[in-house]
Amino acid sequence: MTNLGKIFLRWLGLFWAVSVVAFLLPRLMPDYPVHYYLQQYQLPVTPENIQIVEEQWGLNRSLFVQYGHWLGRFIQGDWGRAYMTGLDVRTELFRRLPYSLLMACGGLLLGGLWAYVLGFLAVLQENGFWGKVSRVHTLLASTFPSLISGVLLIYLLSNRWKLLSFYGEHKLPGILISSLLIAFYQSGHLTRIVIRHLEEVKAQAYIQTMQTRGFSLKTVLWKYGYHYTMYGLLSAMLPQFSWVIGGTSILEYTFAIPGISAFLIDSISHRDYVVIQGYLMLTIAWMFGMHVIVEGLLVSLQQEEAAL
Amino acid sequence: MTLTTKERIAVGLSVLFIVFLLFAPGNSPRQVDMLATLRAPSAEHWLGTDHLGRDLLTLMKHGCIRTLLMLFSASVTGLIIGVSLGLLAGYFDCWWSRGLVFMAEIVLTIPTFILALIITALLGLTPVSAGFVLGFSSSGHYIVQISQLVKEVKERPYIELLHKTGISHRRIIFRHVWVNILPVILTSFGNQVSNYVLDYAGLTFIGLGTDPTQADWGTMLYQYRLYLFDAPWLVILPCLGIFCIALVFHILFDRSYQSLA
């Protein structure tokens, strides 16, 4: 079997396995969504009422039948309706997705760019100013909670200085600040990767030879260290795409951004099985998409490096 | 491992602060006093009181104990599940070991924080349950990383020679393979610990399934965020607690940070 075939089969297996986890996990929760639903509409929680709602939602059937029914419809594009709001889950998730994607992708790309620049500057001068900045940055990003940075920025920018409004109709300020925060926290870890890779390039004999011939370290590292460092940076960014989807949930919550994670948090508190299932499936689709894009970029970088 | 003077001072002060919190006097974190709300630090309340008149030192002490309990639970779960399964999956190359790695990849695909959010809503958010979930999520990393490493170690000529001399698998794993992978395990552990602390603070900040009367630092931050300027110590203290614990583990265990230094 070709490599492509193996990768396809592996991802197909992952999709199926996550669909089982996504289906079973919410059903293990101690509270029952039917009870929440009846309480929300101030209806008595009687066996008759429970039976009516269960029939309406299909929860009276066996788990096996429920799973087959949900997966079959999911593949056809019908992700079901949220129990509490009655909203179409696919439409609602896709309506909210741009907010989360803008925060996550914007933050991660900005973080990657900042990590490269900071790492590059830090390597140019041993124990220099940028090296110290990168160390303090890495330390803060690994030890200072993002939720506090978020709260602090809200108070400073919104309450104290009245520069931005985060809880109004426009969500752009919140998305922008969240992206910057994600960039800050992501670049802390990524800067270390960049520095480690550039240091390895710097130690190569041919780099030192070029320097003795009068080429500046900046020029040599920029030209010959780029592919190797970018390869390491992109490989390190790949698992971060999973973190970013989860990581946005705290910032969506803090800045009241109507992203997919905020929708999930609401739905977990109401035990809305359909939304949780849809969200988890969307997450694996997101990871699949990111793997395809990043793997493609890595192959292209390898080819470019070989051509040098 | 050599630390600079500044790092030694930072670690020393952080450890001192944590020890002070652990051994500080305190009563019940639920004891409210509406006649003594938002008091500044005094002889009676060393760190002041919150908006419900609760003694902040008591709350900080309980928050510290709960965070350390979570760390213990997460570390034990992650290491036991991750290391043992990673060793087995790497050493025995067969259908079930490949299945184990596949399951680890499933765990890696689902974002840790989301998995923790869902499962702690299921189990109830306590330090032990949160630690279990965070440790379980990190076990995916251990399994994938350790199984790869064990496969490499297994192919070394002296391990093959040990096989031929009839030494049992158990002896080879625990006497020879284990020694080679231990430094990598410790580095991974160091990388994980500060993440556990920050993730737990995030979980208690969002507060799904949590008991809001319990003194978790994340819960305190959520409750006190409105007093950031009127009573800043309410926010600064839990922040300092999270920062100190994360800092100690980050500087002492995270090898990638040390290599940067």
Image (spheres, grey):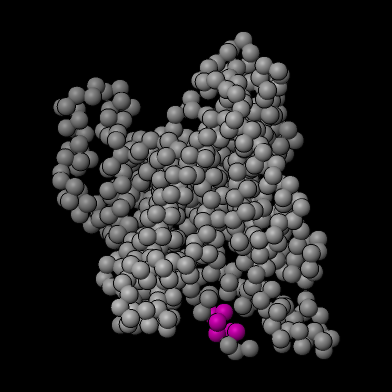
Which residue is nearer to you in this view: B216 or A265?
B216
At x 60%, y 24%, the residue is B25
At x 42%, y 83%, the residue is B157
- Considering the image in quadrants, where does the C terminus of chain B appear? bottom right
* Relative horizontal placement of residue A124, taking residue A194 as reference (left or right): right
Identify whether B209 is placed above or below A229: above
Q: Secondary structure of the magenta portion, mostly?
A: helix
- Considering the image in quadrants, where does the N terminus of chain B appear? bottom right
Q: Is residue B32 magenta?
A: no
At x 65%, y 70%, the residue is A196
Which residue is nearer to you in this view: B93 or A289?
B93
Measured as percent of width and height from the top left, residue A145 is found at 60, 44
* Relative horizontal placement of residue B230, taking residue A126 as reference (left or right): left
At x 53%, y 30%, the residue is B62
Measured as percent of width and height from the top left, residue B148 is found at 43, 71
Measured as percent of width and height from the top left, residue B110 is found at 41, 55
Q: How many marks can you see?
A: 0
The residue most toward the top is B35
* Relative horizontal placement of residue A231, taking residue A65 as reference (left or right): right
**Quarter of the image holding residue B177?**
bottom left
Q: Is residue A88 visible in this depiction of the protein?
A: no
Which residue is nearer to you in this view: B171 or A301?
B171
Measured as percent of width and height from the top left, residue B48 is found at 67, 22
Please provide the residue range marked out in magenta.
Answer: A300-305
Q: Is residue A27 visible in this depiction of the protein?
A: yes
Which residue is nearer to you in this view: A18 or A42?
A18
